[in-house]
Amino acid sequence: MTISPHLRLKMPWPFDLVFTHISARVPGPEHHFLTTPYGMMFDELTASLVKIDLDGRKVSESPYDVNPAGFTIHSAVHVAREDALCVMHTHSVNGVAVSAQEAGLLPLSQQSLGVLASLEYHDYEGIALNEEEKPRLVHDLGGNTYLMLRNHGLLTVGATPADAFVAMYFSEVACMIQVRATAGEQPTRSARSSTQVS
């Protein structure tokens, strides 16, 4: 099985090397899903995805390991959200920068308004290896498309890999615009009205 060609494109923003991940639910009652092999970047993915169950066990032969933190995050979402057939999580520079800002994503751009319409936040609890974090992560995501993991990065869900990727694209672009707009010494304006944000 190969991953969507959308995801094999050279990404227009830097990720955290091999520490970001994507997963896709496999049709069927077993709740298996495919996830990125630990040690590969998104542009290296082809037929190398690892098929695992909800306990993180490989269910088909693969020479690759699975990122334990990636498993914690993705399995939580796949169990809770039947509609989240694809989950994408990144540690992009702009996404982490905005996730560390107290106000989070601001309504500074057209792109941010779309994200803000379906965005929630999850507080940082350290590297996501603790099974006890799963219910809190799922609660914070709720029925939204976007989740900003504080001091950590961005997460999107979609009915297809293309949907999750497009959501991540707009989430990242909104963060990039915010980082650039707030880097200057000029006050910023809200895209929702003509009022100043800062």
Image (cartoon, rainbow, N blue to C red):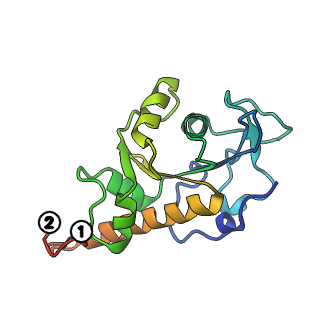
Badge 1 element: helix
Q: State the residue at coordinates (21%, 70%).
A: 190
Q: State the residue at coordinates (31%, 50%).
A: 100
Q: Is residue 92 left or right of residue 84?
A: left
Which residue, given by chain and number where applicable, does mark 1 sit on?
182
Residue 134, given in percent of the width and then of the height, sits at 49, 30
Dividing the picture into quadrants, the one containing residue 125 is: top left
Q: Residue furthest top?
A: 132
**Number of residues whose C-alpha sits closer than 10 Å to that of mark 1, classed few (under 14), some (14–19) or many (20 or more):** some
Q: State the residue at coordinates (38%, 52%).
A: 119
Considering the image in quadrants, where does the C terminus appear? bottom left
Q: Relative to the observer, which residue lies in front, 81 or 72?
A: 81
Dividing the picture into quadrants, the one containing residue 1 is: bottom right
Position of residue 89 relative to residue 196, above or below, is: above
Q: Is residue 16 left or right of residue 192?
A: right
Badge 2 element: loop
Query: Which mark, by number, is residue 120?
Result: none
Query: Which mark, by number, is residue 198?
Result: 2
Residue 135, given in percent of the width and then of the height, sits at 46, 29
Q: In terms of sequence position, does the residue under pointer 1 or pointer 2 come before the other?
A: 1
Q: Relative to the observer, which residue lies in front, 111 or 41?
A: 111
Q: State the residue at coordinates (35%, 38%).
A: 123
Residue 162, given in percent of the width and then of the height, sits at 62, 63
Q: Are dots 1 and 2 in contact, CB under 8 Å?
A: yes
Task: Please state which amino acid type lies under the numbered disc 1.
Answer: Thr
Q: Is residue 89 left or right of residue 30?
A: left
**Number of residues whose C-alpha sits closer than 10 Å to that of mark 2, classed few (under 14), some (14–19) or many (20 or more):** few
Task: State the separation of the CA atoms marked 1 and 2.
Answer: 8 Å
Task: Please state which amino acid type lies under the numbered disc 2.
Answer: Ser
Q: Is residue 137 left or right of residue 60?
A: left
Residue 152, given in percent of the width and then of the height, sits at 42, 46
